[in-house]
Amino acid sequence: MPRPPANNGENSALSRIENAFWVLLEQSDYKDITVKAISSYAKVNHNTFYYYFRSIDDLAKYCFKKLYKVGTMPDENLLFDNRIYKLGDGTDNPDAYDRWLKISLFTCKDSKYLLNIFEETLLDYWMNKIGVDYNDLTFDEKTKLSFISAGACEAVSISRKSNNPQVLLNIFTSDLGLSIVNIIKSISNNHKKKN
């Protein structure tokens, strides 16, 4: 398939496809998003879509990982981006607010695939932060992290459904949030002792 014309700007075919995904995800159920709908909204043909992505699932994962990467998290925060604490009502930090709105879509669309992307990304982030390979974790450690990531998904979903990112701040700065950080740190310490 020939390569689409080079245009790396905001209006490139890839950018339009990404934007179409976010708009359609906001408006409809994930299962209802099609290559035809994405292509039509992005004003590209389906060959251009397939030049960049193998499927809608591939596009979803790309969009989420790109969005999460844009908000790389500082070392001191093991749970989420420190900018979550500055979200407010979106007027003070519209970029962070928009990011929260998009990320939270993955937790409230009744799609197991989208939830898996969210949880997988969160686990990857935690493992990267503490310098531990997920495959080296014990069954007990994997169970704890799975439980925590599922809870984090639900907290993000609740904050989205109530249109109140402050819910996340309340949870992550509470005793519960501190306990979660301590569990993650203890996993890190256990693996540092082994090495």
Image: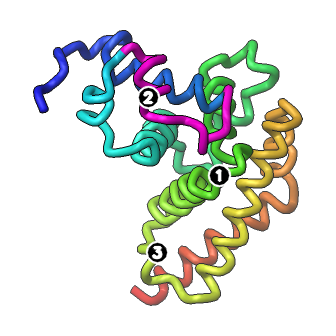
The residue type indicated by label 1 comes to Ser
Position in image of residue 64 (x %, y %): 50, 41
Q: Residues within 10 Å of mark 3 (few under 14, many from 20)?
A: some
Q: Which residue is mark 1?
A: 111
Q: Nearer the viewer, residue 118 or 2?
A: 2
Tell me which label, 1 or 2, sits earlier in the chain.
Answer: 2
Residue 62: x percent and y percent? Answer: 41, 41
Query: Few, some or many C-alpha atoms within 10 Å of disc 1 (few <14, some 14-19, many ≥20)?
Result: some
Image coordinates of residue 130 in percent, x first then y, are 50, 65
Q: Nearer the viewer, mark 3 or mark 2?
A: 2
> Which residue is labeled 2 in the image?
36
Q: Is residue 37 magenta?
A: yes
Mark 3 vs mark 2, CA separation in Å: 37 Å
Q: Is residue 98 at all visible to an observer of this figure?
A: yes
- Residue 122 can be seen in this image: no
Residue 134 is marked as 3
Going 79% across and 37% down the picture, which residue do you hit?
A: 160
Residue stretch rendered in magenta on the structure: 27-43
Q: Nearer the viewer, residue 90 or 131?
A: 90
Cα–Cα gap, marks 1 and 3 = 24 Å
Q: Amino acid at mark 3?
A: Tyr
Q: Is residue 166 magenta?
A: no
What element does badge 3 sit on? Answer: helix
Relative horizontal placement of residue 184, taking residue 121 as reference (left or right): right
Where residue 83 appears, as percent x and y from the top left, is 65, 33
Number of numbered discs visible in the structure rendering? 3
Q: Main secondary structure of the magenta part?
A: helix
Rendering quarter of residue 52? top left
Vertical placement of 18 versus 144: above or below? above
Q: Is residue 67 above or below residue 37?
A: below
Callouts 1 and 3 close, C-beta under 8 Å? no
